[in-house]
Image (cartoon, rainbow, N blue to C red):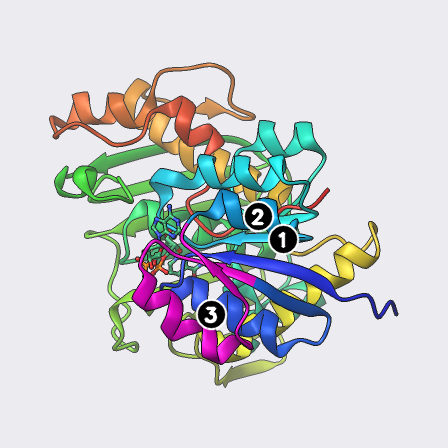
Amino acid sequence: MSDRVYKVVVVGMGKRGKHHAAAFHANPRFEVAGICDIDTARLEAAAADLGNPKIGTDAAALAAEIRPDIFCFATMPNIRYDMIKIGVDNGVKLIARRIMELVRGAGVKTVVSHQHRYGEHYQKVKEIIASGAIGRVQTVYGHATGWMMHMMTHMIDYMSWFNGSYDADWVMGQASGTGKFSDIHASPDYIAGVIQYSNGVRGYVETGAGAPDVPEVDYWWRKCRIGAQGTEGFAETLTGGGWRAVTMDGVFSGPGCMNYDLDMPPYIADMAAWLDDDGAVHPCNIEAAYKGFEMMMGICRSVVSRGQIALPLGDGPAEIDALQGILGGTPALLSMEGNLKEYPNGVMVNG
Ligand SMILES: NC(=O)c1ccc[n+]([C@@H]2O[C@H](COP(=O)([O-])OP(=O)(O)OC[C@H]3O[C@@H](n4cnc5c(N)ncnc54)[C@H](O)[C@@H]3O)[C@@H](O)[C@H]2O)c1
């Protein structure tokens, strides 16, 4: 194993940025060389716990000064493109988030922060399904009470993983409610989608105020249920409430709860592995995440134009803006073009 230490810049010292910075700092394969936030109080408060790296309020200037191997940003969705551009312009090997064309064109490895999958309960459900213990998978499902731009790519990513990472042939969807159009994670209040995977498996996904409750879980953001039904049983994980399965061998259940302290270290370690070895592709790589993102945007397009939407997506209407027209909402924040290039969740890039 290589012992090279990779230099990291982390932008955004909010909840997610601090989780990333702490996990990099705790791993000897990385040096947190710089941190950035426009809020200097946050910046100064975070620095002491991270070995007092360079600090700055201007991400571009800090990246230009440090020239990091990894540019990680955990800021809000509206500035993701600018952040990616800073990372690419400064020759990083790994940055956090968005814009396929930009990162593909620059040849940069990218990771999207679908890190829930590192939870022991997610791993256990994946293992049961992959072992064949529930027979042939017929259906995968995922629902979350959190709204679409926060949660739907998480749900789809884990559903697709449980289904062996097959592509989708087509998707279809319906949505209601406009309250969340004005949110920075602009979304319909509720949206439901059907996914037809190329191996014949059917996926069902729902997010927002209308998705089923998960009464076993108290914490609202973790009210998510993701699983698979097969010919011989089922296996599912509750983001905040362990896992359960009925298989050809009996009835089983076990613990597990989304936990950044447990999920972030292996997710970060896999970045060093990918930087060391092109073949050790990170499980949260952007190409896989992008397929899930396309499924989500295809579901939005179906709400607008009705019927099945073939994937991969070609040119089409501005889904979110058109949704606004159909549902009668206030102006949406994101256009289709922007969305196809945007990532609603964390990403990392490398060159
Ligand atoms: N993968 C996950 O499980 C997960 C969970 C929560 C949030 N997220 C995503 O992470 C992102 C950040 O969420 P958060 O909860 O940490 O938000 P937050 O508001 O707590 O933190 C964002 C930080 O970015 C800073 N910032 C804003 N503009 C900046 C700029 N131009 N330069 C430098 N810093 C800037 C803000 O001052 C703030 O400190 C969101 O996009 C969210 O969707 C992902």
Decide if ligand 1 comes within 8 Å of the CB at mark 3.
Answer: yes
Q: Residue at x 25, y 77 (%)?
A: 218
- Nearer the observer: mark 3 or 1; the answer is 1
The residue beneath circle 2 is 63
Image x and y of residue 319, in percent = 33, 24
Precedes in sequence: disc 3 or disc 1: 3
Image x and y of residue 311, in percent = 54, 26
User: The C terminus appears in which quarter of the rendering?
Assistant: top right
Range shown magenta: 34-57
Q: Which mark is residue 19?
A: 3
Asked which secondary structure carries label 2, the reply is helix
- Tell whether 101 sits left or right of 227: right
Do callouts 2 and 3 mark residues in contact (Cβ within 8 Å)? no
In front here: 67 or 289? 67
Q: Amino acid at mark 2?
A: Ala
- Give the spatial CA distance, label 3 vs label 1: 21 Å
Q: Amino acid at mark 3?
A: His
Q: Which mark is residue 66?
A: 1
In this view, 241 is above or below 93: below
Q: Quarter for ligand 1?
A: bottom left
Asked if residue 119 can be seen in this view, the reply is no
- Nearer the observer: mark 2 or 3; the answer is 2
Image x and y of residue 178, in percent = 14, 37
Q: Residue at x 60, y 49 (%)?
A: 65
- Give the spatial CA distance, label 2 vs label 3: 20 Å
* Label 2 packing within 10 angstroms: few (<14), some (14-19), many (20+): many
Q: Which mark is residue 57?
A: none
Q: Quadrant of residue 41?
A: bottom left
Image x and y of residue 36, in percent = 45, 57
Asked which secondary structure carries label 3, the reply is helix
Do callouts 2 and 1 mark residues in contact (Cβ within 8 Å)? yes
